[in-house]
Amino acid sequence: MEANPKYRKLFEPGRIGTMELKNRIIEAGMGTSLEREDGVVDDRIKNFYAERAKGGVGLVTMGVGAIDHPNGKVLPGQLGLSDDKFIPGLKDMADAIHKNGAKLAIQLQRGGKLATEDLCHGCQPKSSCCTPIPLNDAMLDMGAMEIPRLMMRFQKMPTQMVTVELTKDEIRDMVDKFGEAARRCKEAGIDGVEIHAAHGYLLSEFLSPSCNKRTDEYGGDLKKRARMVLEVIEAVRGKVGPDYPVWIRIDGYEFGVPNGITVAEAKELARLFAGAGVDAINVSGYGGIRGGFYDAPLCYPRGNLVSLAEGIKRVVNVPVIAVGRIDAAMGEKILRRGKADFIAMARAVLADPEYPNKVAAGREEDIRPCILCYHCVSQAFWGEPVFCSVNAAAGKEEELNITPAEKPKKVLIAGGGPAGMEAARVAALRGHKVTLCEKGRRLGGSLVFASIANADNEGFLNYLIKQVKKLPVDIRLGVAVTPALVDEMKPDAVIIASGGAISIPEIPGSNRHHVKTGKHLRQFMGGNAEKFDWWWKAMMSFASRIMPFLLRPPVVRLLTRVWMPIGERVAIIGGDMVACELADFLVKRKRKVTILETSTDMAMEMSIGRRWSFMQHLRDAKVTMLRNVDLKEITLQGVKIVDGEGQERTVAADTVIIAGGMGPNRALSEALKGKAPQIIDVGDCSKLRLIHGSVEDGYRAALSV
């Protein structure tokens, strides 16, 4: 198949040393913990990477191969490279990747101060020198139930939370282990290795002046700090020879890290490493949890690290790999403008393994987009396997493989939210005759409101709508599923995705005109206008029927920056993720916002990785967050509370929004009992499932029919 000419450079063959790649798309290495704890390749991790190879990447990079397994690990599951016993499994992996048309590499890595598995087993991690371990930073904004969960993982942690400085003999031993690991990779048929000298791991701890305080030949000026890495390059080359592809991943800059690696130092390091014989430079970045975590390695600003790659490309004569939330369109521009030679993607191909093939075929609208929820990355913090909120099959490729149904059945789906649409998509792909009923005027359900409050969700909303419209799905808007409809249609299976029931706490004064609920706001954003003035109701009704484009999420976000029927001072009762995202939405529209939460926890539904950044963003935006409050009464002046210090006070507010909680809604399920051979509840109607749970529920339900 000829590649889409719009992406001529992206699908042009390229070389890293002697290795020729069919295109310029690399799957970036990322820790998954899908691997077994003993480090041996098994079917789960093999299927995971094989699916990405099948999807069209030129090179699959397996993340964080443990050169000193089981020591120095950052995850319970990492592929072992420390013994010849690992070679047969690695060979099986290489064969699987090659069979699916890609080349295979693996990162050579040791965790350094981030070796959390050492901590879990009561050992102090080894590092460039003795430094504190920043575990307390990770506990910022954690919830009451999460801290015990964290402590359970680290219950055997050492009494001294500092790293141990490697001796010179230990450094030499570690260098040899990098070389031996590379040898095993070559013997296993892996096409190349990437020396991981970034992201706060051991080698980067020697490179960074923020960590390396040594006074011997391995510390001091830049060349001395680079000495261990140069010795690793030499050891690897000595074991694999001059023609085997070897490259290195470095930080082009350390964001928010005092006395970290500067842009100028990164360029000089790149020159040193290229001169030492690496075949390419992969330019990433790093920031601590309280520093630049969302600048790098979790890039929120799209293409945040490209300028670093561009700067390094100007000073080296080997290929440069750019990474950092780069999509196909941006990647093509980067390549055409000579800013880099290859584009690396991680979360994009986690969300949709077929990303490259779809781009090549001109099917961009069929790409399942990452929503930047960072549940995938946050799993590493808990020491648990990766999952993807929008791709239920990620890490479960064999278990959740979509296969044709043995006998096509009539499937009726109640509800057009994420669970319902995903169920419809998968059921239709399996060959079932699917009818999707949505009682409202539009598809999307709670995902519409989620996309207005957080624009990162919108791409997935659009993807699901496009998929069910493309597939042979009978979509009926404005139609509620009832017992009578089921009797009439006689489906073989009914999948109930009708959403949860919003529970509103009883607070004196909650019936006042200036009090809105989460339900009212969802209706307002979605085209209804309960509990708003009559003229506003009339206008919204007109817009939803005559000009529905006005209620598309981007248009609503734009119009609400001009005007919305919400006062200047807003008190939000409730501190869950929806409430906190609503606070962010309102503060961007020049509202003064106070969140009132009756417990200690806020935004617990967010992944911990996203929460670190998001809650700091709210603090920077001057959102007042009050925890442990006792709600007394809503008055015309605001909300009377007793705060966490036991002081009675009134929080001034022109508008009070009661976010409310989400509970199960089994009314339809109860009403349909015995009406169909198979009835399945999915999404929030069974319990709070959010996007990731709703998608998986819908997916599994469709497979079970």
Image (tube, grey):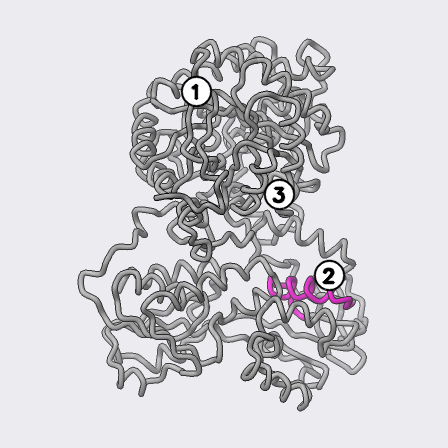
- Amino acid carrying label 1: it is Thr
The answer to whether residue 93 is above or below residue 383 is above
Q: Residue at x 52, y 59 (%)?
A: 459
Image quarter where the C terminus lies is bottom left
- Sequence-wise, the earlier of marks 3 and 1 is 1
Q: Which residues are magenta?
A: 573-591
Q: Whole-Å distance between the Cαs marked 2 and 3?
A: 32 Å
Q: Is residue 260 left or right of residue 427?
A: right
The residue to which callout 3 is attached is: 303
Q: Is residue 189 left or right of residue 588?
A: left
Instruction: Give how far across and how far down residue 15 sits, in percent.
Output: 46, 26
Instruction: Give how far across and how far down residue 504 sits, in percent.
Output: 59, 77
Q: Residue at x 48, y 35 (%)?
A: 24
Q: Residue at x 48, y 30 (%)?
A: 64
Q: Whole-Å distance between the Cαs marked 2 and 1?
A: 57 Å
Secondary structure under tag 2 reads strand
- Sequence-wise, the earlier of marks 2 and 3 is 3
- Amino acid carrying label 2: it is Met
The residue to which callout 2 is attached is: 625
Q: Residues within 10 Å of mark 1 (few under 14, many from 20)?
A: some
Q: Residue at x 57, y 80 (%)?
A: 547
Name the residue at the bottom extreme: 534
Q: Residues within 10 Å of mark 3 (few under 14, many from 20)?
A: some
- Amino acid carrying label 3: it is Gly
**Quarter of the view holding residue 101:** top left
Q: Whole-Å distance between the Cαs marked 3 and 1?
A: 28 Å
The answer to whether residue 60 is above or below residue 389 is above
The residue to which callout 1 is attached is: 18
**Quarter of the view holding residue 245:** top left
Query: From the viewer's perspective, is the residue at label 3 or at label 1 nearer?
Result: 1
